[in-house]
Image: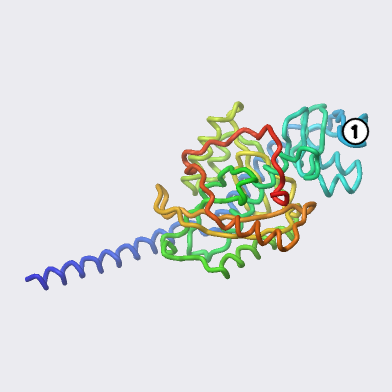
Amino acid sequence: MYIKEILLKMGTRTVCRVLQCRFASTAAALRPSAAEIRQQRNAVFSREQARQRALYPRIEKIEVSMHGPGLDGTLLIMNRGLSTPLSCARHLTEHHVNNSALALVDGELWPLHQPLTRSCSLTLLTFKDNDPTLVNQAYWRSCAALLGQVLETAFKDEYTVELLGTPEVPVTSGAFCCDVVLDPQLDSWTPSEESLRSLTRGALQLIHQDLPWEPLEVMPPVALEVFSHSRWKQEEVEQRASQSPKGTVTLYRCGDHVLLSGGPLVARTGLCSQYEVTALHSLGRGSWGHHRRAQGLSLPLQLQAHHTVWRKLRQRAQKPINVPAPEEAAPPSPPESAQPPPAAV
């Protein structure tokens, strides 16, 4: 009798496994492919971008007063709703175009590709400013966004990848990070050193393409449509919109990848230089499945590290970064005091 019970239980488990595989296969067949999802997100982004640009049907001039070393007193006449801080940099020198990462517009942090909507004062920010705190934090955030983009396209189409977000961590933590849930079929997968090198190569390809991070401030219904295939992103949209004074959220597009960001990103991927994916740690079971935390290390083009220094920084970046759970974390305010860049650690 005991043997019969064992056989019955084994048979039940076998049936359950077969049914789970069938249900997973059916779900995979019903959901759109990763390429179709990227195409849909791009289409909504482009449509909203065109709508916002159409709000300025005729050319109106604005005055932009430049500030910074050697620029005080420089006045540029630009186009309202069309010209960006990068457009202003192009009226200056090649140095300003190549080295500017972010801008201050009337004291407000402003992405380099975001159109100017009024006459204003403008300061271009670089990694070598006396106080690079805001640029460093935007760079760390951008490197994490790049890591998420790599993770989303690194696996075969039959595997789902759900990006949970990029936790805000200070540069002094030693690594940027991106939380992710991979397909349940990969729950037992442990990434090898070659897997991490493959992810690094994917990031370096995007850096070599020198892609812009295009910002777009939108109302929640637009963002919800963009992320209609992601329950996590829809919750994140609602959370960020509730915390925004204007009730809006900011999207960014890099190539064919659209993401939601809690703060400004730097101008382009080409500002990254040394870049390495250092770890992919398991966080255990969470509300969305098996949570993992991918980590990486990078230095911008203007700051290079000797290979011995890089090796020490890399060892530090492999250690797990402890941050609040994504669903509990709130986007922090910009730091008020300067922190040294990674090369100075």
Q: Quadrant of residue 155?
A: bottom right
Residue 284 percent across, percent down from the top left:
41, 54
**Residue underneath mark 1:** 76
Residue 16 percent across, percent down from the top left:
26, 64
Q: Nearer the viewer, residue 259 or 107?
A: 107
Q: Residue type at mark 1: give it.
A: Leu
Tell me if residue 211 can be seen: no
Residue drawn at x 39%, y 64% is 25
User: How does the figure colour the protein chain or chains?
Assistant: rainbow
Residue 187 percent across, percent down from the top left:
42, 61
Residue drawn at x 86%, y 44% is 96
Q: Quadrant of residue 298?
A: bottom right
Tell me if residue 325 can be seen: yes
Would residue 179 be found to the left or right of residue 126 on screen? left
Q: Nearer the viewer, residue 134 or 171?
A: 171
Crowding around mark 1 (Cα neighbors within 10 Å: few <14, some 14 to 19, many 20+) is some
- Can you name the residue that lies furthest to the left here? 1
